[in-house]
Amino acid sequence: MASRLRGRRATTTILACLLAAGTALTPLSAAAAPGPIYQNPRKPVADRVADLLGRMSLDDKIAQMVQAERNAATPARAAELRLGSILSGGGSAPTPNTAESWADMYDDYQRAALATPLGIPTIYGVDAVHGHNNVVGATIFPHNIGLGAADDPALAERIGRATAEEVSATGVDWDFAPCLCVARDDRWGRTYESFGEIPRNAVVNSTIINGLQGKRLAAPGSVLATAKHFIGDGGTTGGKDQGNTEISEAELRAIHLPPFRAAIARGVGSVMISFNSWNGVKDHGNKYLITDLLKNELRFTGFVVSDWNGIDQIDGQEGFTAAEVRQAVNAGLDMFMVPHDYAKFLDLLRAEVQANRVPLARIDDANRRILTKKFELGLFERPFTDRSFLKTVGSKQHRDLARQAVRESQVLLRNDGVLPLPKNNAKLFVAGKNANDIGNQSGGWTITWQGSSGPITPGTTILDGIKQSAGKNSTVTYDREADGLDSSYRAAVVVVGETPYAEGQGDRPDGLALDAEDLATLAKAKATGVPVVTVLVSGRPLDIAQQLPQWNALLASWLPGTEGGGVADVLFGAYRPTGKLSFSWPSSSAQEPINVGDGKKPLFPYGYGLTYRR
């Protein structure tokens, strides 16, 4: 029996080498000697999984439960340990950062995985949270807060599909999106990753999952979606990232659970656990939440993945321990994002299983869930990049879709009649630090983890869009600080707000006021007597109540991404504003947190948004 098993593995290795060499393989005829069941695409997925599990050693199984960072595990190293997954953290990209380089890198990992004895393909994950945002040249869509304001589930699904195509072009088959958090405190640095402050916003926009996963995971251009972060990340006390969500179970279920219920109904393939605690217990080690609620009550059949080094936080001490590994696995986590310490994790988990502190049945359950998705994705039959999708990366079709999303996401909050701007025979001035900056208008999770200012990827700035929209005999003058603006101009469009940030670094517990540069630019514009149109580029509502009376119009543009022409379309009236607030707008930072039904009077209520007269 042992020699027969070795023969089967040798056959697998030969097949993998032929695949790596690009050799075309003809499917076996019915009369040909059958290979292992798990290699037969005609067999049911459950049978293939069972067959493969029966051939796997303990080392094979625990390795399938590990996800390492590409910078810490070369293809050879990943294959040596038979790791189940690789990821690119925010900003982790090959050089040069092109879609083609990504595809080459992905295929290198896949070739190495296929050359292992069982030839189990890897699954590669990225945070493509508003387009394939790690890749230079990809289409960058508005962040979720803008899509929540657009309130167009069909649009969200189309964005999911476009994102999946661009992700597929780079070989990647697993997207850590969508974020289905319900942000309850705008001081939280991930507010822009939320569709809104009530569960409905995330529930209706969970259609993005259908776009990402397509009708079948194995279909071309489909990728595995991830509902994250389970659960309560948007409800932490003080809006502290990775903090403590101190609420009753009734509130947890009423506010934070419905989006995940909707995602599971849509067949989402994976769920990522949240960094936060619930009443002092870290989610990553909470068996009630992961196994009892998510897997048993909600009947989630996909696999559960940790967040970045999430198990390291269970005991509050630096570095994960055997006890933390044991607690997390037994709590129901299936795959572990241990970007750099994957070898340590393997050693600890192996010892826990051998000591019977982690049941082998739990290991098998995790593997069954992970392998099922690999089979459903078609990775065993088509493990390499489908490069036919390279033409979709940053394509006109996708950029047009992004521009439509920008248009629909704009929320007009104030207008004394200065908008829409005249297209022809107009002298217009544009100012502000966010007027001519792709990085600022795209926000965090763009090319790098925290994002950055400047021309970080191709696109159309808001200033570009205004210049392109200005018509016959119109002039557009720009100066960041509004120098040169005088009373001869018809209007001044001042584009202000936040600069990029992401989780952790984006928390603003001390207030949400405009910065000194913005206030100075706005004051300079107001002093000229020219009508001031303020365009606010931000990842959340800001504290602007004191300045609001000085503005003739206020447009909330959120973080529109690379297609700033959509903002200009609304400013000039080519598209009538239709966006509505999915967050209550505070009258001051002192009001935070403020949400529908809490009795506080906002500056602008949830659901507010003006439009133009026809």
Image (cartoon, rainbow, N blue to C red):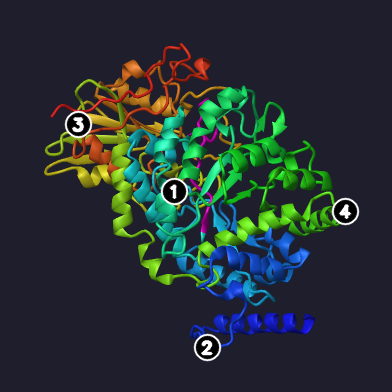
Q: Considering only vertical position in the picture, is 27 above or below 472?
A: below
Mark with earlier residue (3, 4): 4
The residue under label 2 is 31
Which residue corresponds to the image point at 40% horizontal and 60% vertical from the top-left? 165
Magenta span of residues? 174-191
Disc number lying in front (2 or 4): 2
Residue drawn at (32%, 18%) of the image: 550
Q: Nearer the viewer, residue 299 or 342?
A: 299
Q: Nearer the viewer, residue 27 or 400?
A: 27
Identify the residue position indicated by label 3 in the image.
420
Q: Quadrant of residue 62?
A: bottom right
Residue kind at label 1, given as amino acid type: Ile
Question: How busy is the neighbourhood of tag 3: few (under 14 within 10 Å), some, or many (20 plus)?
Answer: many
Q: Which residue is mark 4?
A: 355
What's the CA distance linking mark 1 and mark 2?
Answer: 41 Å
Element under disc 2: loop
Circle 2: residue type: Ala
Tell me the distance, in whole angstroms, between the alpha carbons under discs 4 and 1: 40 Å
- Residue 497 is a magenta residue: no
Q: Mark 1 sits on what residue?
A: 209
- Secondary structure beneath disc 1? helix
**Residues at marks 3 and 4, CA–CA distance in whole angstroms:** 71 Å
The span from disc 2 to disc 4 (Cα, nearest Å) is 46 Å
